Image: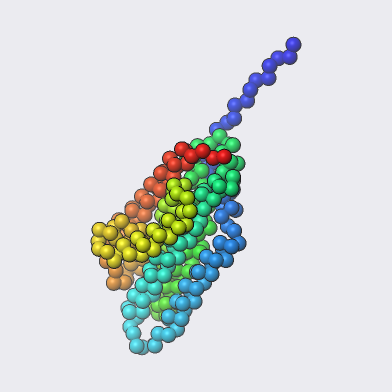
């Protein structure tokens, strides 16, 4: 008589390892040539226009403070309101939304791990893809638009910090949207254009509900230059952007836990 073979129980994957595994799988999924070319072209356009803006500035006609304000305004108006949210939307909404539809998530579902690390790894993959395409154009575009005058390096540094923090917050938000709705790109573009693009000009209350209001505060404060904005404090901006990132990931984990993945 043959003795029964004891059944094996699969060991639970630790959270850190689960997040790393998810990241490795999904970062390759989102880094497609089409997305990189299209979004890279948008960043190149920003830098080109910024160079032309700086090139057309007549030397001596405007003071350095005005040029710095122009550079910061350009980084805000093109980088923080267009490039950062759009690039974050494309990668954030697709990292779990598209992989759910094409069956990639089944590979992760077969492993015994909780949903929160999956969401963290997915958001990290989206941010990894987005950051070079948001930070570099926003920083370089602002620097060039300021005509590279003394202090323009501060504009570039502030723009890079604002773009990086904004990308992290938007990526988390759009990971959640990608799990909540079908065709998240359309919903996301509507949010970016109709709310983020207009909220800052609708008054203080509306600006407080807009991520752009906080990213432009980072832009204004980090360089310690008066850009003519009406910013929040640095602490407030950092806390709100971090809170949005954490809340977006937490809600996405809850949503993912309730989804059936085929």
Q: Residue 203: name its quadrant.
A: bottom left
What's the residue at 63%, 25% (across, down)? 8
* Percent position of residue 134, x then y: 47, 64
Q: Quadrant of residue 149?
A: bottom left
Note whether residue 67 is visible. yes
Number of marks in picture: 0
Quadrant of res 142: bottom left
Task: Give the colouring mode of the picture.
Answer: rainbow
What percent of the width, then of the height, locates residue 45?
A: 50, 73
Quadrant, the N terminus: top right
For the question of whether residue 233 can be seen, the reply is no
Q: Residue at x 44, y 45 (%)?
A: 252
- Residue at figure coordinates x 40%, y 85% from the top left: 57
Which residue is the extreme one toward the left? 204
**Which sits in the foreground, 250 or 165?**
250
Image quarter of the C terminus: top right
- Residue 245: percent from the left, percent from the top? 40, 51
User: Residue 7: where, in percent of width, then height?
Assistant: 63, 22
Residue 90 falls left or right of residue 166: right
Furthest residue to the top?
1
User: What residue do we see at 45% from left, 65% from top?
Assistant: 83
Closest to the observer: 100 or 213? 100
């Amino acid at each position: 008589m043959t003795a029964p073979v004891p059944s094996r129980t699969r060991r639970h994957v630790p959270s850190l390892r689960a997040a790393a595994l998810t990241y490795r799988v999904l970062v390759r999924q989102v880094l497609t040539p089409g997305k990189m070319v299209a979004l890279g072209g948008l960043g190149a356009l920003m830098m080109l226009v910024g160079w032309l803006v700086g090139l057309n500035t007549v030397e001596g006609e405007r003071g350095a403070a005005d040029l710095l304000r122009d550079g910061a305004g350009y980084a805000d108006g093109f980088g923080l309101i267009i490039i950062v949210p759009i690039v974050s939307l494309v990668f954030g909404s697709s990292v779990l939304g598209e992989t759910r539809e094409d069956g990639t998530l089944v590979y992760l579902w077969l492993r015994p791990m909780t949903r929160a690390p999956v969401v963290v790894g997915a958001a990290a993959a989206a941010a990894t893809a987005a950051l070079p395409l948001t930070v570099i154009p926003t920083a370089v575009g602002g620097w060039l638009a300021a005509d590279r005058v003394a202090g323009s390096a501060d504009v570039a540094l502030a723009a890079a910090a604002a773009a990086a923090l904004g990308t992290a917050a938007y990526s988390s938000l759009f990971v959640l949207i990608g799990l909540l709705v079908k065709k998240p790109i359309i919903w996301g573009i509507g949010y970016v254009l109709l709310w983020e693009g207009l909220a800052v000009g609708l008054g203080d209350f509306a600006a407080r509900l807009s991520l752009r209001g906080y990213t432009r505060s980072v832009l204004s404060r980090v360089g310690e230059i008066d850009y003519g904005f009406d910013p929040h404090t640095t602490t407030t901006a950092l806390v709100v952007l971090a809170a949005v990132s954490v809340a977006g990931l937490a809600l996405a984990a809850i949503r993912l836990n309730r989804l059936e993945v085929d």
